[in-house]
Image (cartoon, helix red, strand yellow):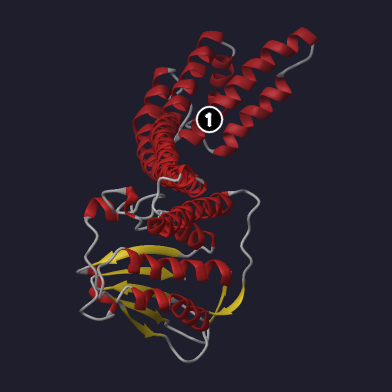
Amino acid sequence: MGTGKKSSEKQLKGLILTRFFFVLVIVSIVELVVVALTNTYLIPFLVVFTKYDKVIRVDGAEGFFIIMFVLIATWVVNWIFPVFKASPEAVTGFLEDLIVRRGFIVDDVEDAKETIHVLSSNPSVVISMVLSLLIVIVILLLPYIIGGIVFSITVAKEIRKLEREKEIERRKDEERRYLMISNIVHDLKTPMTTVYGYAKALNDGIVPKDKQSEYHEAIMTKTDRMNEVVALLLDYVKLDSEGFTIKKSMTDICEMIRSCCAFCYTDIESSGDEIEINIPEKPLYVNVDSVQMSRVITNLITNAIRHNDSGTKIGVHIKCENFSTAEDVRIFVSDTGKEIPSPLSEQIFDPFVTGDESRASGAGTGLGLALSTKICDMHNFSLKLIQKPEINRYNLGEEYNKVFVISM
């Protein structure tokens, strides 16, 4: 769930940045067009409409804003200063000179200043200019307003989509959790029922003496099965607990994998399988938790033994681009067994997925690969299943049908 949450957050951040820059580029382009149209058509029309065309030359929105500022300020000065019995002439003169210095006056300067003074004293004209100013501001801001709305709607829509996906994932997690509990109960109840039945038969004295050893052995086998399920389940829960941390150290993974192969060698011989080991002689040091990663390699080899027919060839390979820097290290555990069908291959790393029709077949608990995936995730490694024809690109040998790849 933690990985999924980080992925959703990263996806949302990427979407917001992408949409923001996309909308910004579009808005900037539209703004240039809007400013050009405003300067060419709207501003001249407003100046003519408000009867300032005789005395003012306005080339664009910037000049229009300056003219509006001066006219409104002049009107405010003429309206406020008489209240205080002060002459507004000095202030209005300064404001009108500002227009002159900016080059907005046409024809006769004195006549233009007088006309501006008269017009600015007329409230109806000033109000019309203020309304014109508001229209220009709204038009110039319109691309940004629309861009903001589009951006907000797009992001909100994507957030709702991610929330729906998160809810679906949460429900799937609940379903997997319930299925896990059901499988745990099944994996414990079946051997417990057998143990209870055999123990009761022995206790009641109804088992012949020549069969008692067989019953004892069956009880031990079923008890071992229960212990294995409980131990693996505890490990699975422990790896997922908040306080658990892996203990990394620089480890020669070539030597580590040789030890794993030696540990599994008896089981390989007992099952009638053979193993091909292609591990470099020189050491390859990687920062890993050797105990946990040894468990991953052992699980993958054991998985190949349990879930394939007798006589299967198992291959263990290591490939590295640069041994001195341990770059692009990959560990391969391949086999010549049957390929895993598509529906199962997509769920093979989920807990309690064994690929057997009957869970009582004893082929495994279905927790080995789930544990291995968790351990690899904690190392920031990836574990994936590759089958034919994609397996051919790794050049492991034509006889292998599937391979588990650990990318470090």
Residue designated by label 1: 65
In the image, residue 142 lies at what x, y percent?
42, 29
The answer to which quarter of the image holds residue 23 is top left
* Horizontal side, residue 328 vs residue 269: left or right: right
Pick the residue in front: 271 or 242: 271
Which amino acid lies under the numbered mark 1 shown in the image of this protein?
Phe
Pick the residue in front: 160 or 202: 202
Q: Is residue 12 visible?
A: no
In the image, residue 141 lies at what x, y percent?
45, 30
Task: Count numbered badges in the picture.
Answer: 1
Q: Is residue 183 above or below residue 285?
A: above
Pick the residue in front: 370 or 265: 265
Question: Going 47% across and 82% down the picture, which residue do you hit?
Answer: 258
Pick the residue in front: 358 or 63: 358
* Horizontal side, residue 171 vs residue 129: left or right: left
* Horizontal side, residue 243 vs residue 337: left or right: right
Question: Going 53% across and 54% down the picture, which residue do you hit?
Answer: 231
> Outermost residue toward the bottom?
281
* Horizontal side, residue 182 vs residue 324: left or right: left
Q: Is residue 35 above or below residue 288?
A: above
The answer to which quarter of the image holds residue 51 is top left
Q: Is residue 196 above or below residue 223?
A: above
Secondary structure, mark 1, is helix
In the image, residue 177 lies at what x, y percent?
44, 39
In the image, residue 314 lies at what x, y percent?
32, 76
Near mark 1 (Cα within 10 A), the count class, few <14, some 14-19 or many ≥20, is some
Q: Is residue 263 visible?
A: yes
Question: Going 50% across and 36% down the picture, which residue do you hit?
Answer: 62
